[in-house]
């Protein structure tokens, strides 16, 4: 008799972009659990980061990403490999990370302040961004490098201009990560509508004919975050959950 074995899967649902977040303040045992999911290349990248807080944020982000991706694919987390390709220069040592498995969901990571956030989608590329809610922002510089004149002027009329600008900044970064061009696009040319539709999606346009995306805020206590997917794709729902370790 043939024994059929099935692996418990937590497949990423079609039509849904999954956002998972974690505080970086985890216990030593939890951090060990995440460390055990890393492959050698990711361990080396993290070890090369100079500041301890950067290493911690990257560890938590990559650890929770691997746990979710491993659950979706039904493989051990430490067996997963990432590849990176920069659409701006073609290099493979930097750029948007992807899981090196043909059937894998698209992924995006972000880490800032006390948070790590990842997103997964089986419907096409995804971008996620988190910003510390109390960053030390040079708004005059940001005005030139992040916002169009119209966006800047509109934000001045918001009840809390700094909060509106930080939220808009996060939406722009999430949008810029969808294609993997990132800030090389010039965030001031990534135009995101201030208002959202009934489902919370903001319409956005990428420059240079790269197309339209939609962006939604991700509610986190103590941080500002956003997730973006191509417009017209099927990923319309989104779930936001804390990644338990
Ligand atoms: C991606 C980018 C927006 C991240 O900004 P950030 O606020 O500093 O950092 P975040 O924590 O939000 O995101 C970092 C993560 O984004 C991912 N990432 C890096 N480059 C990316 C890109 N081009 N597109 C999408 N995601 C990217 C990585 O997973 C990275 O984390 P990791 O290094 O631990 O794996 C910014 O660094 C960027 O645009 N870089 C690309 C610039 C570029 O391409 N220049 C041209 C080079 S030829």
Image (spheres, grey):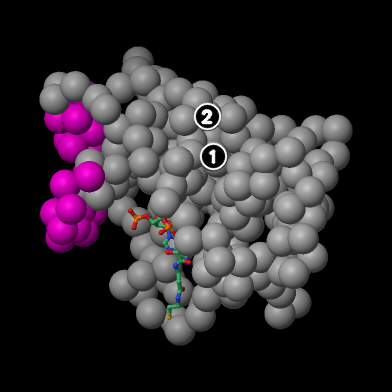
Q: Secondary structure at mark 1?
A: strand
Magenta region, mostly helix, strand or loop? helix
Q: On the rendered image, what quadrant is the C terminus found in?
A: top left
Q: Is residue 44 toward the left or the right of residue 225 in the image?
A: left
Marker disc for residue 168:
none
Q: What residue is drawn where x is 63% and y is 51%?
A: 165
Q: Magenta stretch containing residue 204, yes or no? A: no
What residue is shown with label 2?
Answer: 220
- Using the image, determine if residue 240 lies above or below residue 136: above
Q: Is residue 198 toward the left or the right of residue 5 in the image?
A: right
User: Residue 228: image x %, image y %?
Assistant: 64, 49
Quarter containing ligand 1? bottom left
Q: Magenta stretch containing residue 49, yes or no? A: yes
Answer yes or no: do the residues labelled 2 and 1 have beta carbons within 8 Å?
Answer: yes
Q: Nearer the viewer, residue 55 or 67?
A: 55
User: Residue 59: image x %, image y %?
Assistant: 25, 42
- Using the image, determine if residue 47 lies above or below residue 235: below
Direction bottom: furthest residue: 89
- Using the image, determine if residue 61 lies above or below residue 71: below
Q: Secondary structure at mark 2?
A: strand
Give the quadrant of residue 68: top left
Q: What residue is drawn where x is 47% and y is 30%?
A: 222
Residue 80 visible somewhere in the drawing: yes
Range of magenta residues: 30-53
Question: Separation of disc 2 and disc 1 at Cα?
Answer: 6 Å
User: Residue 83: image x %, image y %?
Assistant: 37, 62
Q: Is residue 188 toward the left or the right of residue 96 in the image?
A: right
What residue is shown with label 1?
Answer: 224
Confirm or reject: label 1 Cβ below 8 Å from ligand 1.
no
Q: On the rendered image, what quadrant is the N terminus found in?
A: top left
């Amino acid at each position: 008799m043939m024994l059929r074995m099935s692996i418990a899967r937590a497949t990423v649902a079609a039509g849904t972009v999954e956002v998972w977040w974690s505080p970086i303040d985890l216990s030593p045992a939890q951090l060990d659990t995440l460390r055990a999911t890393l492959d050698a290349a990711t361990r080396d990248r993290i070890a090369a980061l100079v500041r301890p807080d950067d290493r911690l944020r990257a560890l938590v982000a990559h650890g929770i990403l691997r746990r979710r991706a491993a659950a979706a694919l039904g493989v051990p987390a430490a067996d997963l490999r990432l590849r990176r390709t920069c659409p701006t220069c073609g290099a493979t040592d930097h750029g948007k990370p992807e899981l090196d498995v043909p059937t894998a969901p698209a992924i995006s990571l972000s880490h800032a302040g006390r948070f790590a956030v990842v997103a997964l989608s089986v419907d096409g590329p995804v971008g996620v961004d988190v910003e510390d809610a109390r960053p030390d922002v040079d708004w005059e510089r940001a005005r030139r490098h992040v916002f169009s004149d119209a966006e800047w002027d509109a934000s001045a009329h918001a009840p809390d201009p700094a909060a509106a600008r930080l939220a808009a900044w996060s939406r722009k970064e999430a949008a810029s990560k969808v294609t993997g061009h990132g800030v090389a696009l010039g965030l001031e040319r990534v135009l995101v509508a201030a208002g959202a539709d009934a489902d919370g999606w903001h319409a956005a346009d990428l420059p240079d004919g790269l197309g339209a995306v939609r962006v939604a805020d991700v509610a986190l206590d103590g941080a500002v975050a956003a997730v973006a997917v191509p417009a017209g794709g099927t990923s319309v729902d989104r779930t936001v959950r804390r990644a338990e370790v």
